[in-house]
Protein backbone atom coordinates (compact mmCIF):
# COMPACT_ATOMS: atom_id res chain seq x y z
CA UNK A 1 0.00 0.00 0.00
CA UNK A 2 1.37 3.42 -0.92
CA UNK A 3 2.19 6.19 1.53
CA UNK A 4 0.96 9.76 0.91
CA UNK A 5 3.05 12.70 2.02
CA UNK A 6 2.17 16.39 2.28
CA UNK A 7 4.99 18.78 1.34
CA UNK A 8 4.46 22.41 2.32
CA UNK A 9 6.39 25.67 2.20
CA UNK A 10 7.76 24.83 -1.24
CA UNK A 11 9.70 27.41 -3.17
CA UNK A 12 7.47 28.75 -5.93
CA UNK A 13 10.26 27.75 -8.33
CA UNK A 14 10.08 24.07 -7.34
CA UNK A 15 8.68 21.65 -9.88
CA UNK A 16 7.46 18.06 -9.75
CA UNK A 17 10.76 16.68 -11.05
CA UNK A 18 12.57 18.42 -8.16
CA UNK A 19 10.27 16.70 -5.64
CA UNK A 20 10.55 13.34 -7.41
CA UNK A 21 14.35 13.54 -7.23
CA UNK A 22 14.38 14.72 -3.61
CA UNK A 23 12.06 11.98 -2.34
CA UNK A 24 13.56 9.40 -4.70
CA UNK A 25 16.66 9.42 -2.50
CA UNK A 26 14.59 7.56 0.10
CA UNK A 27 12.68 5.06 -2.04
CA UNK A 28 10.39 4.56 -4.99
CA UNK A 29 8.16 7.53 -5.76
CA UNK A 30 4.86 6.66 -7.43
CA UNK A 31 3.34 10.12 -8.00
CA UNK A 32 4.14 13.77 -7.39
CA UNK A 33 1.65 16.62 -7.58
CA UNK A 34 2.35 20.30 -6.90
CA UNK A 35 -0.92 22.15 -6.38
CA UNK A 36 -1.37 25.04 -8.79
CA UNK A 37 -3.63 28.07 -8.49
CA UNK A 38 -6.42 27.63 -11.00
CA UNK A 39 -6.51 31.31 -11.92
CA UNK A 40 -2.83 32.24 -12.11
CA UNK A 41 -1.37 28.84 -13.00
CA UNK A 42 1.36 29.39 -10.39
CA UNK A 43 2.32 27.04 -7.58
CA UNK A 44 0.40 27.44 -4.34
CA UNK A 45 3.53 26.42 -2.41
CA UNK A 46 2.52 22.89 -1.47
CA UNK A 47 2.11 19.46 -2.99
CA UNK A 48 1.85 15.74 -2.41
CA UNK A 49 4.22 12.84 -2.94
CA UNK A 50 3.09 9.23 -3.00
CA UNK A 51 5.75 6.68 -2.18
CA UNK A 52 5.38 2.98 -2.83
CA UNK A 53 6.61 1.80 0.57
CA UNK A 54 5.31 3.17 3.89
CA UNK A 55 8.58 2.60 5.76
CA UNK A 56 10.57 4.45 3.09
CA UNK A 57 8.00 7.25 3.21
CA UNK A 58 8.33 7.56 6.98
CA UNK A 59 12.11 7.88 6.64
CA UNK A 60 11.66 10.56 3.96
CA UNK A 61 9.27 12.50 6.22
CA UNK A 62 11.71 12.33 9.12
CA UNK A 63 14.72 13.34 7.03
CA UNK A 64 13.08 16.07 4.94
CA UNK A 65 10.83 17.87 7.45
CA UNK A 66 12.42 21.28 8.16
CA UNK A 67 15.15 20.75 5.54
CA UNK A 68 15.93 23.91 3.62
CA UNK A 69 15.27 23.53 -0.09
CA UNK A 70 15.22 26.49 -2.44
CA UNK A 71 15.72 28.88 0.45
CA UNK A 72 12.69 27.62 2.39
CA UNK A 73 12.33 25.13 5.26
CA UNK A 74 10.03 22.37 4.03
CA UNK A 75 7.06 21.19 6.08
CA UNK A 76 6.77 17.45 5.45
CA UNK A 77 4.33 15.04 7.08
CA UNK A 78 1.96 12.21 6.36
CA UNK A 79 -0.95 13.51 4.29
CA UNK A 80 -4.32 13.45 5.97
CA UNK A 81 -6.96 11.47 4.07
CA UNK A 82 -9.46 13.50 2.08
CA UNK A 83 -12.72 14.04 3.88
CA UNK A 84 -16.03 13.66 2.14
CA UNK A 85 -18.07 16.77 1.65
CA UNK A 86 -18.30 19.68 -0.66
CA UNK A 87 -15.32 21.59 0.60
CA UNK A 88 -15.28 25.34 0.56
CA UNK A 89 -16.03 27.58 3.49
CA UNK A 90 -18.94 26.72 5.71
CA UNK A 91 -20.33 28.80 8.52
CA UNK A 92 -21.49 26.37 11.19
CA UNK A 93 -21.80 28.87 14.00
CA UNK A 94 -25.57 28.57 13.92
CA UNK A 95 -28.06 31.30 14.58
CA UNK A 96 -29.29 33.87 12.16
CA UNK A 97 -28.03 37.20 10.99
CA UNK A 98 -26.50 39.21 13.73
CA UNK A 99 -26.67 42.93 13.55
CA UNK A 100 -26.33 45.75 15.96
CA UNK A 101 -28.54 48.33 14.33
CA UNK A 102 -30.51 49.32 17.41
CA UNK A 103 -33.04 47.47 19.48
CA UNK A 104 -32.35 44.91 22.14
CA UNK A 105 -33.25 41.90 20.05
CA UNK A 106 -30.77 40.31 17.75
CA UNK A 107 -33.59 39.43 15.33
Image (spheres, helix red, strand yellow):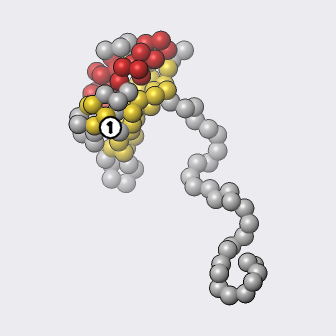
Above or below: residue 98 compared with residue 43: below
Residue 15 appears anywhere in the view: no
- Local SS, label 1: loop
Instruction: Please count the marks in the image.
Output: 1
- The part of the image, by quadrant, that contains residue 11 is top left
The x, y position of residue 17, in whole percent, is: 28, 27
Q: Residue at x 44, y 31 (%)?
A: 6
Quarter where residue 63 is shown? top left
Residue located at (39% from left, 33% from top)? 75
- Viewer-side residue, 105 vs 42: 105
Residue that lies at the very extreme toward the bottom in this rendered image = 102
Left or right: 95 as drawn, with respect to 2? right
Mark 1 residue crowding within 10 angstroms, few (<14) / some (14–19) / many (20+): many
The answer to whether 26 appears left or right of 79 in the picture is left
Q: Which quadrant: the C terminus?
A: bottom right
User: In screen coordinates, is 105 left or right of 26?
Assistant: right
Horizontal and vertical percent position of residue 25 = 31, 15
Front in this rendered view, residue 6 or 62: 62
Q: Is residue 18 above or below residue 39?
A: above
Could you say where residue 3 lies in the image, as x and y percent from the top left? Answer: 50, 20
- Which quadrant is the N terminus positioned in? top right
Residue topped by disc 1: 10
Residue at the (64%, 40%) spot, across then down? 84
Does any portion of residue 104 appear in the rendered image?
yes
Front-most of 62 and 24?
62
Q: Which quarter of the figure has residue 26?
A: top left
- The residue shown at (50%, 30%) is 79
Furthest-front residue in this view: 104
In-image side of 20 versus 48 (left or right): left
Question: How far across and down, in percent of the image, does residue 44 sit?
Answer: 36, 45
Amino acid sequence: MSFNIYVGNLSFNSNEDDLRNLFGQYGEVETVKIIMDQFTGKSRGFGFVEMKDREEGLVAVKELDSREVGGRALKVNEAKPKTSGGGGRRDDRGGGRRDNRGGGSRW
